[in-house]
Amino acid sequence: MSHEVAAGVAAGAGAVLVAIAKPPQATIAAAIDAVSLVAMFVISAVYHRPT
């Protein structure tokens, strides 16, 4: 459950980070970082779901 919550928080924080990034390179880097972090939490949440 905690990884599901973390994925949502990471998505929100990533959106803010992308929005405030100034140079185009920073925007791209922030987007890659945000997508990677959300993917990590989602995969972990799915992996640790009780069966």
Image (cartoon, rainbow, N blue to C red):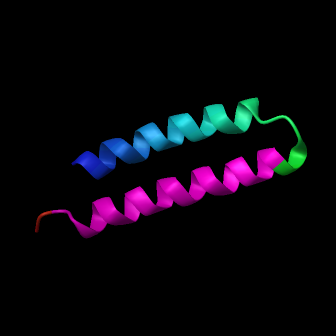
Tell me, yes or no, whether the highlighted magenta stretch contains residue 36. Answer: yes
Query: As displayed, is residue 40 above or below residue 34?
Result: below
**Residue 16 in picture, x, y percent from top left:** 63, 31
Side (left or right) of 22 relative to 32: right
| Magenta segment | 26-49
Query: As displayed, is residue 15 above or below residue 7?
Result: above
**Residue 23 in picture, x, y percent from top left:** 89, 41
Query: Which residue is drawn at the image coordinates 25% and 46% (left, top)?
Result: 2
Side (left or right) of 40 relative to 51: right
Q: In the figure, residue 19 lies in which quadrant?
A: top right
- Main SS, magenta region, reads helix
Query: As displayed, is residue 43 above or below residue 22?
Result: below
**Residue 10 in picture, x, y percent from top left:** 48, 43
**Residue 39 in picture, x, y percent from top left:** 48, 60
Query: Which residue is drawn at the image coordinates 62% and 54% (left, top)?
Result: 33
Side (left or right) of 35 relative to 18: left
Tell me, yes or no, whether the highlighted magenta stretch contains residue 30. Answer: yes
Q: Can you say which quadrant of the picture contains the C terminus?
A: bottom left
Query: Which residue is drawn at the image coordinates 74% and 30% (left, top)?
Result: 20
